[in-house]
């Protein structure tokens, strides 16, 4: 939910690829090592497959690696605040952030468990119309799958989406840029809640 790095003229998160030609590329973090470290450090909250069962803990499965590294950077630099994530990110080197985010980027989307009753078609239609009206589909994609620094929101926990949107609306949830705050600051809270409900149940079609 953030725009391209550097838009604010501030320090950038570490690059996820080696620097330009002519320079010797740094050794890439071992994928197997970070898969194991994810299982040890992250899976208890975020799930072994990246799909958390905790409503306010985001689903990482299907998230782009560039989005993941940006969020780790924000936590490490104190621009986002969460006691557990800040404590973890503060210990990470740039290579650690690359390694974890590259691994997260390999996790395929995991559908939400099937609800006891199917989502109400009228509410889904309203949510889709709001997503179109407020340009959610323009940035997050027609399938709400995200890409680059834009997160996947299809199938994300409703509670997490609602709190995030309300945080951006109030200016209390920082992003790498002000893009999301600007995008949602004028949207009525009832519409934000409807969008969260819709995206959490949207299957990406």
Image: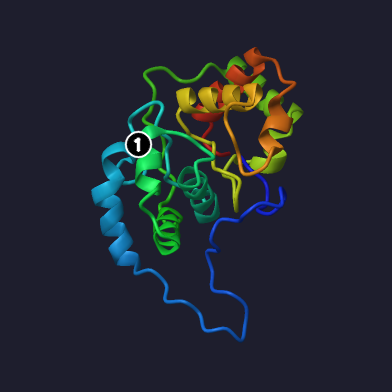
Q: In which quadrant of the rendered view does residue 124 lie?
A: top right
Name of the residue lying farthest toward the top: 190
Residue under the image location 46 percent in, 47 percent down: 76
Q: How many marks?
A: 1
Q: In which quadrant of the rendered view does residue 98 lie?
A: bottom left
Residue under the image location 52 percent in, 23 percent down: 163
Quarter of the image that includes the N terminus: top right
Q: Secondary structure at mark 1?
A: helix
Q: In which quadrant of the rendered view does residue 115 lie?
A: top left
Viewer-proximal residue among 196 and 120: 196
Measured along the vertical axis of the image, is residue 43 above or below residue 66?
above
Q: Decide if residue 51 is in sight here.
A: no
Instruction: Tell me: 182 left or right of 104.
Output: right
Quarter of the image that includes the C terminus: top right
Instruction: Tell me: 26 left or right of 30.
Output: right
Name of the residue lying farthest toward the left: 40
Q: Decide if residue 203 is in sight here.
A: yes
Viewer-proximal residue among 190 and 111: 190
* Residue at the spot of label 1: 84
Measured as percent of width and height from the top left, residue 60 is found at 42, 43
Measured as percent of width and height from the top left, residue 47 is found at 31, 41
Packing grade of label 1 (10 A; few <14, some 14-19, many >=20) is: few
Measured along the vertical axis of the image, is residue 73 above or below residue 155?
below
Check the image and tell me how it is coloured. Answer: rainbow
Measured as percent of width and height from the top left, residue 174 is found at 59, 35
Measured along the vertical axis of the image, is residue 45 above or below residue 89?
above
Instruction: Tell me: 54 left or right of 19.
Output: left
Measured as percent of width and height from the top left, residue 191 is found at 66, 17
Instruction: Tell me: 39 left or right of 186.
Output: left
Residue under the image location 54 percent in, 73 percent down: 18
Residue under the image location 56 percent in, 43 percent down: 151
Viewer-proximal residue among 197 and 149: 149
């Amino acid at each position: 939910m953030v725009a391209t790095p550097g838009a604010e003229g501030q320090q950038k998160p570490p690059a996820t690829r080696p620097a330009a030609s002519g320079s010797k590329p740094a050794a890439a973090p071992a994928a197997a090592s970070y898969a194991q470290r994810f299982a040890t450090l992250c899976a208890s909250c975020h799930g072994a497959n990246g799909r958390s069962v905790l409503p306010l803990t985001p689903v990482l499965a299907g998230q782009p690696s560039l989005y993941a590294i940006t969020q780790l950077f924000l936590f490490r630099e104190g621009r986002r605040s969460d006691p557990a994530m800040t404590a973890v990110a503060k210990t990470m080197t740039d290579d650690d952030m690359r390694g974890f985010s590259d691994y997260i980027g390999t996790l395929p989307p995991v559908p939400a468990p099937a609800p006891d009753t199917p989502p109400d078609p009228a509410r889904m239609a309203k949510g889709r119309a709001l997503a179109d009206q407020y340009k959610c589909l323009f940035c997050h994609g027609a399938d709400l799958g995200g890409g680059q620094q834009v997160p996947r929101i299809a199938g994300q926990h409703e509670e997490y989406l609602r709190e995030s949107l309300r945080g951006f609306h109030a200016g209390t949830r920082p992003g790498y840029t002000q893009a999301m705050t600007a995008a949602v600051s004028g949207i009525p809270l009832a519409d934000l809640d409807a969008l969260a409900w819709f995206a959490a149940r949207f299957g990406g079609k």
